[in-house]
Image (tube, rainbow, N blue to C red):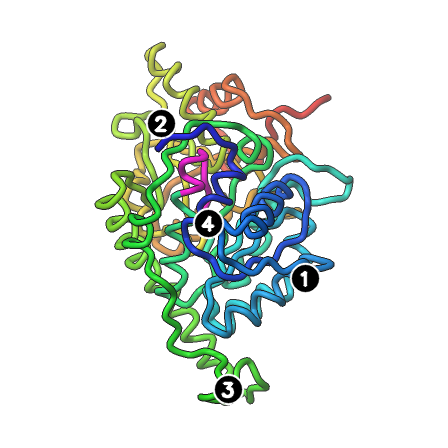
Amino acid sequence: MKRVISGNEAASLAVKLSRVQVISAYPITPQTTIAEKLSELCGSGELDAKFVKVESEHSAMATLIGASSTGVRTFTATSAQGLALMHELLFWASGARLPIVLVDVNRAMAAPWTIWCDQTDSLAQRDTGFLQFYCWSNQEILDSVICAFKIAEKLLLPCMVCYDGFYISHTHEAVEIPEQSDVDKFLPPRDAEYRLDTKDPRTFSGGTLPANFMEIRYKLQKAFEKAPDVINTTYGEFDKLFGRSYSAVEPYYTDDAEAVLLASGSAASTAFHAIRKMRQSGIKAGLLRLRQFRPFPEKELLSYLKPNIKYGVLDRDLSPGTGGVIAQEIRAILNRNNVRIDINEFIAGLGGRDITVDNVTEILLKVRDDKGDKLQINWVGLKN
């Protein structure tokens, strides 16, 4: 069945289809309509789940840490300052190996105060131990949330599904809604091996001596190293049942490209349309769309990056003093693998500034023709 729905409604329906048992969320624009929709579904009985009303995002994550520890399936959603308020407890969720799924509707971080989009909020949480996936359509949101529960529960790692505020969250598109019975086949009820149970008492997240702490972190790292295989297997199972395939990195027109742009989220959608127009004009441009940020898709990216092609990285984020977060990650894997490829770095779309087809065309032409210092940070669309 197809319905025309917003990105936020797609996320809410995915939660319903995933038979989540405990939801706790605090409203914040542009995430608010997710919490509202889920509250309505719980109130009407369409979703048999406990919706816990709390006074802050910090409390929302604390609630889910407790609930997930009992073995139930849990969900929350937030944006920007709300995600920042959760920061302390994101470490608790990952350190306790709790498969909580969180949707972050990307919104720029204050100050100055803004409700518009960039991806700094989620990328700033890169070291918390959450898997991170980035969507560019409402269909992908619904599918990614359902997949996220299966991936998180297999790895015992929390998961963050991200998409651009307003550009995707409030845009309406046709979305294929799967049958509940099919989702049940793909995503069976959570079966937690360890849980809070008065009949089988255990200690969870207590004090740890130095002799054990490092080993716990080692196991967390090993789970992330297993993640690519688990993610790919999950996508394969999803494709087999629903006929939609996903991967960590998705190439478009890269085989013969002279210049390739790496981008994520709605900016990648704009880039796709720009590249199609450039191809019609005889300009050999291409796109690598990054769907996954944690674990960073090192192996997949290296398979696409070629020394004879020029690359640009479009970051809708900023790590002050360093530049774009994604560009920094890509340089790190190139250095680690002794791969000599220069990349141009572009900062665009901060605070919801538009990234247009003309912007992308200008970026790709600059990448193709550039013979200068590849360490330069290029700012796109600045007002003089």
**Image height check: is 180 above or below 85?**
above
- Which of the 4 image quarters holds residue 310? top left
Q: Nearer the viewer, residue 235 or 63?
A: 63
Say which amino acid is labelled 1: His
> Mark 1 = which residue?
58
Q: Earlier in the sequence, mark 2 or mark 4?
A: 4
| Quarter of the image where the C terminus is located | top right
Other residues around mark 3 within 10 Å, as few (<14) / some (14–19) / many (≥20): few
Total labels: the figure holds 4
Instruction: Name the spot of residue 152 as percent of width and height, x first.
Output: 41, 61
| Quarter of the image where the N terminus is located | top left
Instruction: Name the spot of residue 320 as percent of width and height, x first.
Output: 66, 46
Mark 2 to mark 4 CA distance (whole Å): 37 Å
Q: In the image, is residue 135 part of the stretch drawn in magenta?
A: yes
Mark 2 to mark 3 CA distance (whole Å): 57 Å
Q: Nearer the viewer, mark 2 or mark 1?
A: 1
Other residues around mark 4 within 10 Å, as few (<14) / some (14–19) / many (≥20): many
**Image height check: is 324 above or below 355?**
below
Please state the extent of the stretch shown in magenta in the rendering: 133-142
Q: Nearer the viewer, residue 356 or 116?
A: 116
Q: Earlier in the sequence, mark 3 or mark 1?
A: 1
Mark 4 to mark 1 CA distance (whole Å): 23 Å
Residue 184 falls left or right of residue 34: left
Q: Residue 82, labelled with which disc?
A: none
> Mark 2 = which residue?
286
